[in-house]
Image (cartoon, coloured by chain):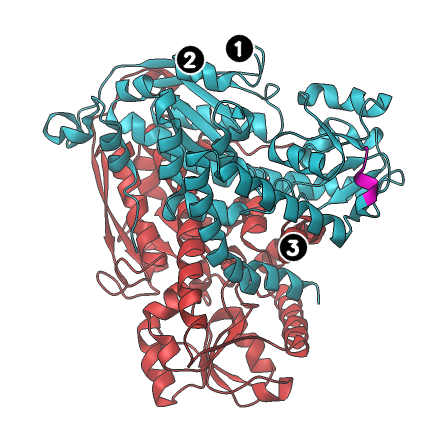
Chain colours: A red, B cyan
Amino acid sequence: MKRRQFVGGLAAAVGAASCAGEKTDCASGTGQSAETFEWSCVTSWPPKYPGLGMAVENLAERIESASNGRLKIKVYGGGELVPAFEAFDAVSRGTVEMGHDASYYHKGKVDAAQFFTAVPFGLNYLELNGWFYYGGGLELWRELYEPFNIIPFPCGNTGVQMGGWFNREINSVDDLKGLKMRIPGLGGEVIRRAGATPVTMPGSEIFTSLQTGAIDATEWVGPYNDVSFGLHKAAKYYYYPGWQEPGAGLECMINTAAWASLPADLQAIVEISCQAITTDMMAEYTHGNAFALQQLVDDPDVEVRPFPDDVLRLLKSITHDIVRETAATDPMWDKIQKSYYAYMEKSTRNQRVTEFAYLRTRDL
Amino acid sequence: MKRRQFVGGLAAAVGAASCAGEKTDCASGTGQSAETFEWSCVTSWPPKYPGLGMAVENLAERIESASNGRLKIKVYGGGELVPAFEAFDAVSRGTVEMGHDASYYHKGKVDAAQFFTAVPFGLNYLELNGWFYYGGGLELWRELYEPFNIIPFPCGNTGVQMGGWFNREINSVDDLKGLKMRIPGLGGEVIRRAGATPVTMPGSEIFTSLQTGAIDATEWVGPYNDVSFGLHKAAKYYYYPGWQEPGAGLECMINTAAWASLPADLQAIVEISCQAITTDMMAEYTHGNAFALQQLVDDPDVEVRPFPDDVLRLLKSITHDIVRETAATDPMWDKIQKSYYAYMEKSTRNQRVTEFAYLRTRDL
């Protein structure tokens, strides 16, 4: 099996003045560069927000410990240094060295980045990582960001999200008509074609909008994050599953010149720490969601219920239409979607006989 | 939410002469220890074996890169330095500094270690990591190994395995009677009570035993590893799901004194690299299994089929009997199983509305 070269391969690909290509000078022995780096990392999250915001704090902590303080990273919440959703531009311009974000927020700049966070009815957590690290996905991601002077690293995942909070029942496809729902990205476009009106707004505005009736519904993440925003106090029906985000992957973005300035061992520490955060953040969500869901199930004012199958079938069919249409006009989208769906075709059968069959068995 | 302190907490707990407790001397600044370490790591795997064996090679590679060569780890396959299945003793005695293994191989020495690899009908990959990192599981594991001078680190996972290869059909619980099957650990004890005869043997002997009829059936891992052993050429029926191993976690064991000899930054590098390998190994299996399963489905001499529900129900019921009986005689088993099953009770509902509901939806 072809195995992606972990650290060395990337350093060489970047073609930077790092130690990777000059082993005799600095990468072969025991001498340590004493040079220190102080980086800024911008995000789209509220500071220390459960899951999303803690992951990047944990990343900075790991990097500082492993580098013995040679690489210190100061993390900024959304809006603290640059506005939320502008992390991509700040890293691209070199205003900051690093960003932690979800790639589908870069819609309009690099639409195809959608595939590296989550696509409706697409790859789940396990499959996304298989595709990134062993199926060519990460190479495509790096190719996509290269013109923007950004190197992306997978860094965290929320797992399967929830379908969202609704102030009215969804019993058929007709109930989507006229629904005003906060839902970003491709999922928003999907419900638009199903007759609803998608709205985008930062997380911080969702609760009030839902409570005042400015919107009828919202998706956010899952029980762990949704409870922290109090969404269960603003809507009654909590629908599953999160067809729109079946395992949202987060990204650590690093400015190409900043990356090239690091010695090879610090590059390795950053890359390894990002991969560690993927395990850690997924564990935090698995844990946090389990406990928060219990609270919601016990709440007499909340009803947890599945979307009807015909609604899910319609949304899936629309998703495939949009992916196909976009492929006709966006060559990178087309290149990436071909790799993504070829991967999913193979992995789907395996998921059926492993994860799915097992969870079914445990409930027998 | 209570968050486990990542690096510092452990160093303090070990009470070692590391830098964690002496920040002014060595952990706050930029000075680097030039001291180098050359460690040996023993395993139970064939050298560079897909998944299991590659994970520990990848671990050594990451640690060497991130430490700029200050910590070099030489990896030994099973039997190269010490016999397979004796890694635990070698690390405990300090014969070697490190081992990579599956904790359920230590049955007879520390029976309760079973819970940290996999328990039949127990936690899956996502849940096991949730329990380890946020639910108290890792603390229990460290408590269990402490008398043996070993610190365990979660380090890799195979995901849900397959039920195994059978030379006869399993259509009812009666078909288990008299079945001679290679299956280790708790799973073996379960099928014994169902009327079968469990056998243990190293992976290298399985193919011949199955082909000659010395055994009627075997479980091993999943398509990726099973194909590499040629098991599809020795049996016709490939059953799923792997009720006996729903997400087998691997371990990196480190001798307590060896750990204490490392400066704090190298400790951090080791701990972070182990957590990164969990992402990487799971990705390798997700990828490798998907492609190998395709090959098996296309093979006219192989039949991939599910176990009957009544067989699975019986095996589940026996598992719970054994867990309960063992708890009555082994206090650490009891302490760990209480934490494990309390966790599973919470997480099961969440898995139903997320991972399970999503995979079902994708197939609609």
In the image, A218: left or right of B286? left
Give yes or no for contact between labels 1 and 2 (Cβ–Cβ under 8 Å): yes
| Label 1 to label 2: alpha-carbon separation | 10 Å
| Amino acid marked by disc 3 | Phe
**Residue placed most toward the observer, A236 or A225:** A236
The mark nearer the N terminus, 1 or 2, is: 1
In the image, A293: left or right of A356? left
Which of the labelled discs sits on residue B82, or is there none? 1
**Residue placed most toward the observer, A318 or A26:** A318
Q: Can you say whether B102 is above or below A202 in the image?
A: above
The verdict on a common chain for dots 3 and 1 is no
The verdict on a common chain for dots 1 and 2 is yes
Residue under label 2, please give it: B96
Quarter of the image holding residue A325?
A: bottom right
Residue under label 3, please give it: A356
Of helix, strand and loop, which mostly describes the magenta segment? helix
The spot of residue B12 in percent (x, y) is 22, 32
